[in-house]
Amino acid sequence: MPEALRDEVRLVGDLLGQVIAEHGGDSLLADVETLRRTVIDTRNHGDARGASPHPAERLVSSWQLDRAEQVARAFTCYFHIVNLAEERHRVRALRETGRGDPGSLDALQGALAEVRGQLGDGPLSELLAELRVHPVLTAHPTEARRRAVTAAVRRVDGELERRSDPRTSHAEQRESKRRLLEAVDALWRTAQLRSAELQPLDEVRTVMAVFDETLFRLVPDVYRQFDDALSPDDAGARPPLVPSFLRFGSWVGGDRDGNPRVTARVTVETMLIQSDHVLRGLEAAADRIGRGLTVDSETTPPDAPLCARLDTARDTVGDRLAGIEARSPGEPHRQFLLHIVDRIGATRHGDASLAYSTPEALIDDLRVVQMSLATADAVRQAYGEVQQLLWQAETFGFHLADLEVRQHSDVHHRALADLSRGGARSGDTEEVLDTLRAMERLQQRFGPSACHRYVVSFTRSAADVAAVYRLAELACAPHAAPDLDVVPLFETISDLRNAPTVLDAMLDLEPVQRRLQASGRALEVMLGYSDSAKESGPVSASLALYSVQAQLTSWAASRSIRLTLFHGRGGALGRGGGPANRAVMAQAPGSVAGRFKVTEQGEVIFARYGNRTLARRHLEQVTAAVLLASTTTAHQRAEHAATRFADLSRVVDGAALGAYRELVDIDGFAEYFAQVTPVHELGGLHLGSRPARRGGAQSLATLRAIPWVFAWSQIRLNLPGWYGLGSGLAVAELEELRLAYKEWPLFNVLIDNAEMSLAKTDRLIAGEYLALGGQPLIADRILAEYDRTIELVLAVTGQSRLLENRRVLSWAVELRNPYIDALSHLQLRALRALRSGVRADAERERVERLLLLTVNGIAAGLQNTG
């Protein structure tokens, strides 16, 4: 373990031990330590792990429920601390790399150099002009931590950062340690479980913290890094070479598919919250820059357009501008920028006499300031912080993120049928109409780009798209309907395969033709990773998604469509998750074309965007991958590999799909799954406002993909991330598999993601959970496929153990495993009690609480949920 990381883990771990002892006495700390040593010792001596009962099982069974709960809290807090320490280590490593050899290239610089070498400057400029990276944040319930816990962890982070400052004195170090102990104590005392269900606006405010603390400040840094990589010698002293290619979207407050709590009122309030946050951010940034822009008219004379704008301001708001001029005499650029600050504030407060009508009007004013500075040869002032503010305004506008609405296709057809019958309308129909009216109102206030995408879940025909346009006409009549881009979402394997046929019929719709003409024939299509993987397993879903990407790319090219594929990827490996930059490079040939749009969900949002350094690294890596994947060389390489290994993929696909469906189609498998996992109990965590099922029926079909994946991860099996792969690999030639792993990015990512999923499993502990179902044949089938998959993954990769070639990752997993074991044994105790039937309500409530605490802790230890 790196020394700095080891020291931080040891320091904060010792402080946590002190807090535990202070809270529960030395006996509580002794119990925690006994369990810790027991799980470590049994991992170090494999024979002890097979004992029945397991030594740790005997220990946790001997405790009263109160003591078991306190121990679970201790291990959960420990994982919060370890996760923080590892995050801080990654930040240090990135900074140290940045301070290394100045001649070495980072991911973005390397990608630009490679693309420039392949294409030349002209085609590179054309690619950059079309570049678009578009993360969409969703409220999918996969973040197990409460916001209060996150805040407590951040407080620990702040104290560790202060303590690491080498300039502090001994007295300051002592005070820092005291404050750090206080922060750890606060973390221990913070409730780990939510006591109330989350409401949609709670989720909105949670996401706002990511925008406020990271993304809004980060965006100019990303553009600046990019611009510097393009031409480092004159960066900041010339017009930028990089356009504002980042855009952010949000489903939080807009996604109502299966979530009746998201209403038209919630959607409107969401946009008002978003707008307030971005306008506050723009106002503060403009004020800071304006107060620092102290260039005077003698050294930096204003040009005619700036003088004209100041004259107009005197005519319209003379008194207010006079006050600014009195405080900044002889500084016309500063005066006008502070006037801009006033106008942004007026926009936020709704003062129509001074407010900006559109973000484009603000951008135009900022460009006037910039051009005046440049004309006066103050180029560093023009293209320094003023440019950064311009980038923020261009990226976020007045709405922060494009708010996207999503609804199930069946809801629209029911609404149309309801309207055709006449008479009183159902509440669901009124809600659909209210939502479309709300979108129209939001466009009137914030512009069409604020809320114009309407995603239709489970799109099966062009009629599903036509229904939304028809409902919009009916909702807004006699006035015009809002500008709508209806985005079909294809989720099941059959729907994915039928997508080109559906899109052909969609192009015949008159509203779609209008939108294509207005947008320069741009069209967006969404592909669902979660439901396809849940339906068909990870192998068949990955291959089907790749195939449909290739088909749609060809389809779009033949019809002169500028296609953007919207990837509905989950955070977990069983829902299309994994490293985003590698996922980009594994896309079908020609499907990226300078545009990449993807969902970011739950814990992934905070893992990728919770820290500015890590967030910048993530966005730079994704952007670099988008550029590389958009080159002719990447296209040809992927096309060759897909053709070369087409027969192999068909063979592997057939066997993998057969194995997966044979398992989930077993009579009683849904009941078995519910018995051996805590899937039913997960709702008690109140992870999000959305119900776990789309309908009332208790079946695998209605269960959403998130609890499906989450439940399997809790029992240390991660089945959705690998099941069926072993059977698929078993029917193919090993040398052919090894060649595909080497040459085909898709197959390489598929194998590596399965390896990671398997590395986070534990066969013995998973076996304990599987035994709860009382069906040894199902358990044996699962474990046989598990063994087969590990054996063949190792054979394909040429390793002797999982993650052998990824030492840092392997080390992190191995160090965590014993501590996760401790929580698993506590969870098994609770699950056994619940499955055997706890008679007293009070006791059942306490057992369920213990179970949920362990769910939180295991999620923190594994660093993923669903």
Image (cartoon, rainbow, N blue to C red):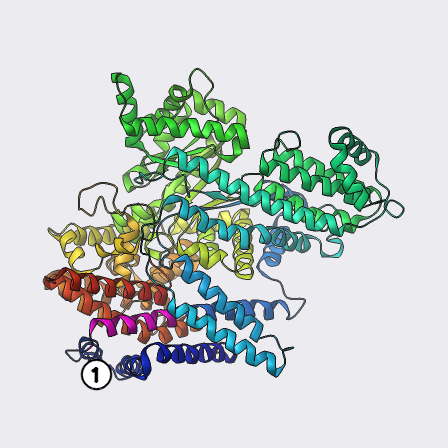
Q: Residue 854: where, in percent of width, then height?
A: 28, 66
Position of residue 571 relative to residue 189, above or below, is: above
Left or right, 268 with reference to 347: left
Q: Nearer the viewer, residue 160 or 471?
A: 160
Q: Residue 381: where, in percent of width, then height?
A: 77, 50
Residue to which mark 1 is pinned? 47
Position of residue 418 relative to residue 784, above or below, is: above
Position of residue 182 relative to residue 430, above or below, is: below
Residue 71 found in image quarter: bottom left
The crowd level at tag 1 (other Cα within 10 Å; few <14, some 14-19, many 20+) is few
Residue numbers of the magenta segment: 63-78
Q: Residue 137: where, in percent of width, then height?
A: 45, 47
Question: Does residue 808 show up?
Answer: yes
Q: Residue 147: where, in percent of width, then height?
A: 42, 57
Please, what is the dominant secondary structure of the magenta stretch? helix
Q: Residue at x 10, y 50 (%)?
A: 667
Q: Residue at x 20, y 74 (%)?
A: 64
The amino acid sitting under disc 1 is: Asp
Residue 758 found in image quarter: bottom left
